[in-house]
Image: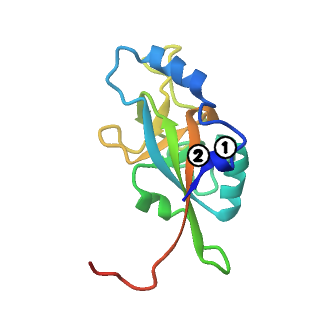
């Protein structure tokens, strides 16, 4: 487990201005503004993210079912599906990230940003797989996410019973 402050050139407060904006925008809402979510990836992408943060412009490598953005999951097991083992050490890479999710709507593959709310100039903040009980979140602005920890791990060869 590696704390990103040891590697990333950016600060965990990178999106602080965006967070303040979202807090004001949703002051009357019960929506959970910020979540800790997982993002599984390759070693090469992990190195890029450590240097540059998540980049929604690079979306689509592992699909874009909910839109062209950066994908995060509530469960590490979901993010595990998007990791690959490195050679020869067989390590996998998953980030624990702080993500500003704000007001969400169901995503669609053609979205390059969240759609507008009420057909006005106000937009949703993120897209999800299921509005009632979201497990996957998609954000379209790198100010909404910060790679907090990089988790490097190996698959176990056998089952451990406790």
Considering the numbered disc 1 on the image, is that residue within a helix, a strand or a loop?
A: loop
119 relative to 152 in the view: left or right:
left
Among the 4 quarters of the image, the one containing residue 110: top right
Q: Measuring from the top left, give residue 68's x and y in whole percent.
A: 60, 43
At 49% from the left and 64% from the top, the residue drawn is 81
Identity of the residue drawn at 53% across and 14% down? 121
Q: Are marks 2 and 1 in contact (CB under 8 Å)?
A: yes
Whether residue 119 is visible to the viewer of this picture, yes or no, is: no
Which residue reaches farthest front? 6
In this picture, is 89 found above or below 133? below
Q: Secondary structure at mark 2?
A: strand
**Upstream in sequence: badge 2 or badge 1:** 1
Q: Position of residue 7 (x, y in %)?
A: 69, 50
Residue at the extreme left of the image, as rendered? 162
Q: Which residue lies under the disc numbered 2?
A: 147
Query: In the image, is 154 to the left or to the right of 55?
Result: left
The residue at which mark 1 appears reads as: 53
Residue under the point 65% across and 36% down: 11
Q: Where residue 54 appears, x then y in whole percent? A: 64, 44
Mark 1 nearby-residue class (10 Å; few <14, some 14–19, many ≥20): some
- Residue drawn at x 45%, y 79% is 156
The quadrant the C terminus occupies is bottom left
**Marks 2/1: CA–CA distance:** 7 Å
Q: Is the residue marked by circle 2 packed among few (<14), some (14-19), or many (20+) residues within 10 Å?
A: many
- Is 157 rendered above or below residue 72? below
Q: Is residue 130 visible?
A: yes
Q: The N terminus lies in which quarter of the figure?
A: bottom right
Q: In terms of depth relative to the viewer, which is nearer, 113 or 101? A: 101
| In front of the other: 140 or 28 | 28
Residue 157 image offset from top left, x and y in percent: 46, 85
């Amino acid at each position: 487990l590696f704390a990103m402050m040891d590697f990333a050139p950016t600060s965990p407060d990178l999106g602080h201005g965006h967070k303040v904006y979202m807090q004001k925008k949703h002051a009357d809402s019960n929506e959970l503004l910020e979540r800790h979510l997982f993002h599984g990836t390759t070693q090469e992408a992990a190195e890029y993210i450590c240097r540059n943060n998540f980049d929604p412009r690079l979306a689509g490598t592992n699909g874009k079912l909910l839109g062209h953005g950066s994908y995060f999951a509530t469960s590490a097991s979901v993010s595990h599906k998007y990791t690959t083992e490195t050679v020869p050490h067989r390590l996998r890479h998953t980030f624990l990230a702080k993500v500003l999710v704000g007001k969400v709507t169901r995503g669609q593959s053609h979205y390059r940003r969240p759609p507008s709310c009420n057909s006005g100039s106000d937009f949703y903040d993120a897209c999800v797989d299921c509005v009632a009980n979201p497990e996957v979140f998609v954000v379209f602005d790198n100010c909404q996410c910060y790679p907090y920890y990089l988790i490097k791990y190996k698959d176990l060869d056998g089952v451990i019973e406790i």
